[in-house]
Amino acid sequence: MTIYTPGSMPISFPMKYAFTLLDRLYPTYRPHKVLKIADGMDCAPEAIAFILAALLFLFKINFAIIFISVLVFPSLIKILHIRSNYNNFTVYSGVIFSYIGKLGLLTSLLTVLGWFSVGWQGLLAFFIARFIGGLVNTFLEAREKRKIRDASGIVINEFDRCFIDAYRFCANKIGLTLDYSISEEELESDRWQIIYLDYSTQDPLLFQARNFS
């Protein structure tokens, strides 16, 4: 059974497990907010790349520095998230980007800005760096998934890890355990259904468009 975030990111964890974990954070963090943060975790490297590129374009920085910066910093964000080191700015930049970044408007605006500030060389440096950075992030994600599979026998996708990252980010804020394993007592409780219903009331259109049951 697949769970979807507000940004339609698929999470393959069993529904009872996922919403039992979200119950720990409730009501300080309602499920919609946690799952939106999961969207932000997924988008954070790309958001940082766009913010960084916009600043470099505005200050007309050399194309070589644009290439190195846009290649290195988003990948560094990915590494930090994999190691459960989260920064408010990067996470919430990712959340904002998850709302507006996929519309194509930001790419168009950034392209226009780059063309008139740093020319085709700067733009080319940005897009090549993003392409290589995407390959690097894919490699880092694959290596992390392989480590988890070898250690626990559990196969997860990158969105499952974003969900766990979002849980750990929120749990750290309110002083809860970062351990995402569920006790037998928690599993025997039916409170997860309350959290499920809370999410369905906050995102009724998402529940209509996606099959949650």
Image: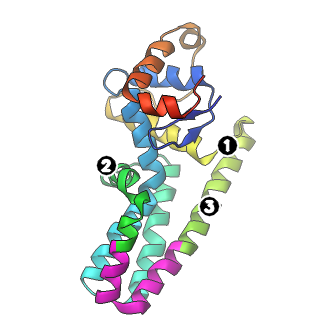
Going 71% across and 36% down the picture, which residue do you hit? 154
Residue annotated with mark 3: 138
User: CB under 8 Å between callouts 1 and 3?
Assistant: no
Residue annotated with mark 2: 88
Camera-nearest residue between 19 and 82: 19
**Residue 29, placed above or below residue 20:** below
Going 36% across and 48% down the picture, which residue do you hit? 95
| Mark found first going from the N terminus, 2 or 1 | 2
Instruction: Specify few, some or many for label 2: CA neighbours under 10 Å numbering under 14, 14-19, or 20 or more.
Output: few
What is the CA distance from the residue labelled 1 to the residue labelled 3? 15 Å
Residue segment shown in magenta: 109-130
Find residue 148 and name its label: 1
The stretch drawn in magenta includes residue 10: no
The total number of labels drawn is: 3
Q: Mark 3: which amino acid?
A: Thr
Relative to 96, is 131 on the left or the right?
A: right
SS state under label 3: helix
**Residue 184, placed above or below residue 109:** above
Q: Mark 1 or 3, which is nearer the eye?
A: 3
